[in-house]
Image (cartoon, grey):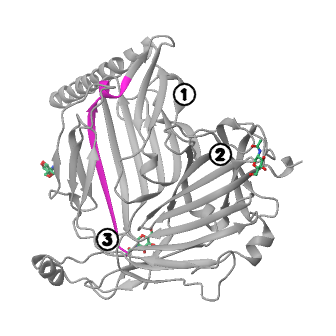
């Protein structure tokens, strides 16, 4: 009966997905919902714990609802049983028939008996959800952000008690919605503040809320305005090219990135003098970004970093030695990247960062299928940043066949093309994946498998030999021409 509106959008950015779950009408009650919102700059982390009680035997499929605004800002969502590591299978249904809540079905690890309960923890990372307020700030001013959300966590089930906590990273909370004259579902104060934490609730006996009537009559809008003296980093564009070369036993990774500080826009002109004197007094402008520390893989060499004006020599790289594949080791090469100018609010900075790695650190051979297996990291995490648009291109050796790829989460789109470089004869197959709004949760590995026929291995030496031969022939021809001229 519910099937007609079942949405078949590509499942995006989810953990594990089991196709074929049907939105079954298992009935539950939420004995408690606690939502904790860790406010931040480009990223906001929301953890919601649902204490769930089954109202019938064999209840296994629990429906989660997100309000429209929340759904639009969610770039990562995963559900677990409290205290357990495994993520639960989820299916995304899209908007409910009346279009007011975005629904997911979560499959519990085992069916619950009547009156049995469990705690479901849903982790969400939201992006582009806070904004600077005021939108402009002078170089020495502080910066403040606003975050807006809905008061009630929506659910298709009745909820016995519900709370929302908003935690500001800075004790300076300028203002928050106080809900004067609000006495629905509560007899106490509807909101309390303690230090940097604002708590909405407890609210009692909330009827099923993932429907038009509840949203129209009871839902409230809340906002928090808090100090945030850090840059708000966005990577507006990331283009990663990973080139696999068996001939050179090398993996080259090159990132072309545009950074954007989406914090309060700099009011007036940038003063280098003010910048330097504030540095001198140890009070640098709080929302500017002077440098970035990146954790690059161990074992890299020949790193390069340049921008539109050429080589940037103010960066430093501490290389960590190569780590054998599969070894449990958290060694990283540390790159301290210092842009040519400090990145103020509203400013952009584009650069290219690349390095080489021994291919053996990333590649293996699957005896059973006779295929090479190479793991390519999706991206390098930039702390606190969201990657708005990412294009990841994996360039395979010339002549590779039987190509398959296994991304850690489904791309928005993917394509196979041919990439031709110097000394290539037929070009190299390349896989390109597109993503949006990536965060630290998305730093997984894309596995690529392929075969390289023996003839393809020979193609490169033959191409090189042919190149030498043609140079030789040209020289030979030139010499003959020369002789003729001399004769005249
Ligand atoms: C389930 O809980 C309800 C109310 O708490 C109670 O009336 C009922 O007897 C319980 N059923 C079982 C099988 O425990
Ligand atoms: C670029 O700068 C680095 C110092 O960070 C230096 O070691 C390297 O030789 C420079 N490369 C070129 C091509 O100038
Ligand atoms: C930064 O880039 C964005 C587009 O990504 C553009 O709209 C904006 O004008 C740029 N800002 C500056 C200061 O150039």
Residue drawn 25% across the image and 84% down it: 140
Cα distance between the residues tagged 2 and 1: 42 Å
Q: Closest to the observer: 115 or 351? A: 115
Q: Closest to the observer: 8 or 228? A: 228
Quadrant where the C terminus lies?
Answer: top left
On whether residue 390 falls in the magenta region, the answer is: no
Magenta-highlighted residues: 346-363
Is tag 3's residue or tag 1's residue first in the polypeptide sequence?
3
Report the residue marked by disc 1.
404
Relative to 280, 179 lies left or right: right
Residue drawn 42% across the image and 45% down it: 443
Cα distance between the residues tagged 3 and 1: 42 Å
Is tag 2's residue or tag 1's residue first in the polypeptide sequence?
2
Is tag 3's residue or tag 2's residue first in the polypeptide sequence?
2
Disc 1 secondary structure class: strand
Indicate the quadrant where residue 321 lies.
Answer: top left
Residue 60 picture location, percent across and down: 72, 40
Residue 338 picture location, percent across and down: 21, 61
* Furthest residue in direction left, as rendered: 280
* Furthest residue in direction right, as rendered: 1
Task: Look at the picture and state if 451 lies above or below 33.
Answer: above
Indicate the quadrant where residue 172 lies.
Answer: bottom left
Which mark, by number, is residue 117? 2
Can the viewer see residue 245 in this picture? yes
Residue drawn 34% across the image and 87% down it: 267
On whether residue 351 falls in the magenta region, the answer is: yes
Report the residue marked by disc 3.
230
């Amino acid at each position: 009966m519910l099937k007609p509106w079942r949405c078949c959008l590509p499942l995006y950015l989810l953990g594990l997905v089991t196709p074929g779950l049907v939105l079954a009408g298992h009935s539950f009650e939420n004995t408690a919902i606690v939502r904790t919102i860790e406010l931040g700059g480009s990223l906001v982390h929301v953890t919601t714990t649902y204490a769930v009680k089954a109202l019938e035997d064999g209840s296994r499929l629990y429906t989660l609802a997100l309000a429209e605004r929340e759904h639009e800002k969610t770039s990562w969502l995963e559900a677990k049983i409290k205290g357990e590591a495994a993520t639960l299978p989820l299916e995304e249904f899209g908007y409910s028939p009346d279009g007011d809540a975005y629904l997911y079905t979560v499959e519990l690890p085992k069916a619950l008996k009547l009156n049995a309960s469990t705690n479901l923890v849903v982790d969400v990372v939201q992006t582009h959800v806070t904004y600077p307020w005021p939108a402009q700030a002078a170089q020495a001013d502080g910066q403040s952000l606003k975050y807006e959300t809905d008061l009630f966590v929506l659910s298709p089930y009745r909820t016995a008690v519900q709370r929302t906590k908003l935690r500001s990273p800075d004790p300076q909370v300028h203002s928050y919605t106080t809900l004067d004259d609000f006495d629905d579902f509560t007899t106490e104060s509807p909101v309390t503040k303690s230090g940097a934490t604002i708590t909405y609730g407890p609210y009692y006996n909330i009827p099923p809320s993932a429907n038009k009537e509840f949203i129209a009559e009871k839902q409230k809008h809340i906002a928090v305005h808090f100090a945030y003296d850090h840059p708000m980093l966005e990577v507006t564009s990331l283009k990663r090219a990973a080139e696999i070369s068996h001939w050179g036993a090398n993996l080259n990774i090159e990132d072309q990135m545009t950074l954007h500080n989406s914090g309060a826009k700099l009011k007036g002109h940038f003063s280098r003098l003010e910048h330097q004197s504030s540095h001198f007094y140890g009070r640098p402008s709080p929302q500017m970004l002077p440098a970035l520390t990146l954790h690059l893989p161990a074992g890299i060499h020949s790193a390069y970093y340049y921008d539109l004006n050429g080589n940037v020599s103010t960066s430093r790289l501490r290389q960590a030695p190569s780590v054998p594949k599969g070894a449990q080791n958290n060694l990283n090469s540390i790159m301290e990247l210092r842009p040519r100018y400090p990145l103020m609010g509203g400013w952009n900075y584009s650069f290219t960062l690349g390095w080489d790695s021994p291919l053996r650190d990333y590649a293996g051979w699957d005896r059973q299928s006779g295929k090479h297996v190479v793991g390519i990291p999706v991206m390098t995490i930039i702390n606190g940043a969201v990657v708005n648009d990412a294009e990841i291109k994996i360039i395979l050796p010339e002549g590779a066949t039987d190509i398959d790829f296994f991304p850690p989460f489904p791309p928005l789109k993917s394509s196979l093309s041919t990439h031709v470089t110097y000394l290539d004869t037929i070009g190299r197959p390349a896989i390109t994946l597109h993503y949006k709004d990536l965060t630290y949760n998305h730093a997984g590995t894309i596995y690529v498998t392929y075969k390289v026929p023996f003839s393809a291995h020979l193609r490169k030496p033959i191409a090189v030999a042919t190149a030498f031969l043609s140079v030789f022939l040209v020289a030979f021809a030139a010499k003959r021409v020369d002789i003729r001229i001399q004769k005249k």
